[in-house]
Amino acid sequence: MATKDITHAIFAINPTAIFKIDGEPIYENIEWQDGTAPISKSDLDTKLVEIQTAEDAAVAQKATDKANAKAKLIAGEALTEA
């Protein structure tokens, strides 16, 4: 599982955001540029949780699909697209 940082949340909320981060990728180090409207820390934190939850679900689904495929192969059943 890859950990997403604040840049992923920024671009998920505003794909055209222009900003610079000096140092560690934390809210306090964001410098919004070229008139980009600042995104609140709470909105970024919420989006980070959403992104990580979706990524975790995708990883879990892939593991489930792999286990199901293996079980079907062992049982001699046809595989589905998933």
Image (cartoon, rainbow, N blue to C red):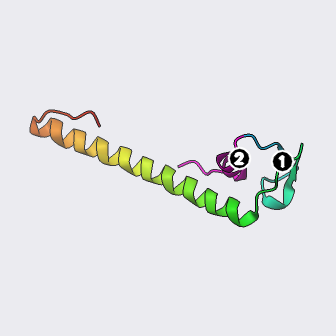
Q: Is residue 31 left or right of residue 58?
A: right
**Magenta-drawn segment:** 1-15
- Which residue is at a point 63% across and 63% down the rendered structure image? 46
- Does residue 80 lie above or below 17 as drawn? above
Residue reaching furthest to the left: 76
- Does residue 13 lie above or below 81 as drawn? below
Assign a secondary structure to mark 2. loop
First reached walking from the N terminus: tag 1 or tag 2? 2
- Does residue 29 lie above or below 12 as drawn? below
Residue reaching furthest to the bottom: 42
Is disc 2 surrounded by few (<14), some (14 to 19) or many (20+) residues within 10 Å?
some
Residue type for callout 2? Asn
Assign a secondary structure to mark 1. loop
Q: Are marks 1 and 2 in contact (CB under 8 Å)?
A: yes
Q: Is residue 34 left or right of residue 57?
A: right
Q: Is residue 53 left or right of residue 71?
A: right
- Which residue is at a point 63% across and 50% down the rendered structure image? 4
- Which residue is at a point 29% across and 37% down the rendered structure image? 82
Where does residue 8 sit, x and y in percent of width and height?
67, 47
Residue under pointer 1: 36
Give the distance between the C-alpha atoms of the residues marked 1 and 2, in whole angstroms. 9 Å
- Which residue is at a point 74% across and 40% down the rendered structure image? 16
Where does residue 53 sit, x and y in percent of width and height?
51, 57
Where does residue 57 sit, x and y in percent of width and height?
43, 53
Residue under pointer 2: 14
